[in-house]
Image (cartoon, helix red, strand yellow):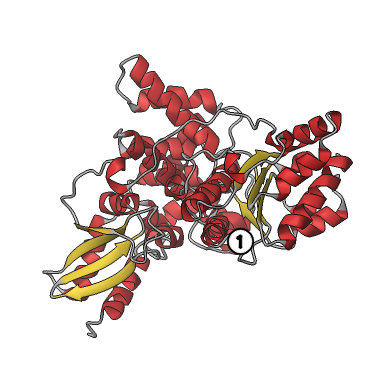
Amino acid sequence: MDKSVNAVWKHTLQFINDNVDEQCFATWFEPIKPLKIQGNVLTVQVPSKFFYEYLEENYIHLLKSAITKCMGDNAKLVYSIVLENAYDNATPPTMKLPSAGRKKLSPQSVNMPMKIGNDKGIKNPFVIPGLQKLNIDSQLNPSYNFDNFIEGDCNRLARSAGFAVSKNPGGTSFNPLMLYGGVGLGKTHLAHAIGVEIKDNYPEKTVLYVSAEKFTQQFIDSIRNNTKNDFVHFYQMIDVLLIDDVQSFSGKEKTQDVFFEIFNHLHQNGNQIILTSDRAPVELQGMEQRLLSRFKWGLSADLQKPDLETRVAILVKKLYNDGIEIDQEIIEYIAYAINSNIRELEGALISILAQSSLNKRQITMELVKSMVDKFVKSTTREISVDFIQKVVCDYFDMPLELLKSKTRKREIVQARQLSMYFSKQLTKNSLASIGQQCGNKDHATVLHACRTVNNLRETDKRFRTYVEELQKRLTLS
């Protein structure tokens, strides 16, 4: 076998890809970069300490099997971690850690920013004559950064575009960059992260984050105080302008007019504009067409509901940052039960931790279920395909990856068919969507699965027991 590092890593990835689903592979293995091979030691680079910790806790056996298969029984793996917030260095500092037997890393040891509250309002600085740029507070929250923004298929495009903008504000084709999506999906977090990163990379640039509502109120105040020109001049001085919830401009003609004027000035001078919205530009109502056309000049990137693995990763990351350990089974339960948005997911976790701390109670599954029920009422909660697959896998004691694999073993096929059957019965997903989530099957396969389950439940007593017991678990969950 060719022992070049790229060839070995290519074979390693092929082995890994055969044993995990596409989402897992894209999130946790594609970002890994092979660096070198010395003897029986393979050194790879991972993007963060959290990435390293997560791989070691969840995929160490798979990684060991993969490199052993490609390099022999004595193969060893060493991680090289590029420290965050070191982009100004020609060669970013790294830390090397061997696989397994690692020590827990404190946030301070890898240059994580301290959490700083930011409850100040913008004090209308545009009314001050001869305003200097250095006097402008960016209004950014440093706790919202790229390090704690978890990437998944649901937000990969938006995060990648945002990171590119942070490296070269005003110098990419992503100007303006519009981030859109539903409530609690991370638009504001990502907007702050871009701003924080730009401030780190370009301290001399003037960055300002402001909500569309605050912008509108400032504009109204400027008209009342006869200081509109100062208002416009202030915003035209900004190097990087972040406007949150731009849909709030809807129906406000004068506000749209003044923002159009500011937008044009900034764009023509190569300054970066970042916008967030709860919907795509084409769906914004009550907006002037000339303004909508400006929004479409750059890139519009959507943030979707986080998939299961992303939800688990978000919880693991938050727990790690707080120095708290919880059983993986409990983490997965929270992730399965709360699938609407990230804000509710984190809110539920905070409530659970608070309940445990204040009442000095251990975090058990019983405690978690009682707390989660307060966030998600079982009578109104729509059961997800992810949740159904989890229940079915737990019932048959099999890993989720096996359920989604291409194996044709009878017991696996039946579990997969039951997942499809209950997904059709209990969710609003289309047949194509169900098939996609059950191992990239087509709608015809889902229909066949439903017919098979109906036939077997009438002719096979044991199979009928499976259906009845799973039905109880799913409806009582």
Residue 42 lies in quadrant: bottom left
Q: Position of residue 338 (x, y in %)?
A: 51, 36
Q: Residue at x 26, y 61 (%)?
A: 80
The residue under label 1 is 443
User: Under tag 1, what secondary structure?
Assistant: helix
Would you place residue 137 above or below residue 48 in this image?
A: above
Residue 426 located left or right of residue 8: right
Inspect this view and state whether residue 120 appears.
yes
Q: Position of residue 129 (x, y in %)?
A: 72, 37
> Hey, which residue is sitting farthest front in the picture?
130
Would you place residue 72 above or below residue 315 in this image?
A: below
Q: Position of residue 353 (x, y in %)?
A: 38, 25
- Relative depth, front residue between 261 and 332: 261
Inspect this view and state whether residue 18 appears.
no
Residue 80 located left or right of residue 459: left
Q: Residue at x 72, y 52 (%)?
A: 280
Give the quarter of the figure containing the N terminus: bottom left
> Hey, which residue is sitting farthest top in the picture?
359
Q: Position of residue 421 (x, y in %)?
A: 54, 49
Label 1 CA crowd tier, 10 Å (few <14, some 14–19, many 20+): some
- Relative depth, front residue between 469 and 64: 64
Would you place residue 421 above or below residue 298 in this image?
A: above
Q: Residue at x 14, y 72 (%)?
A: 40
> Hey, which residue is sitting farthest bottom in the picture?
2
Amino acid residing under circle 1: His
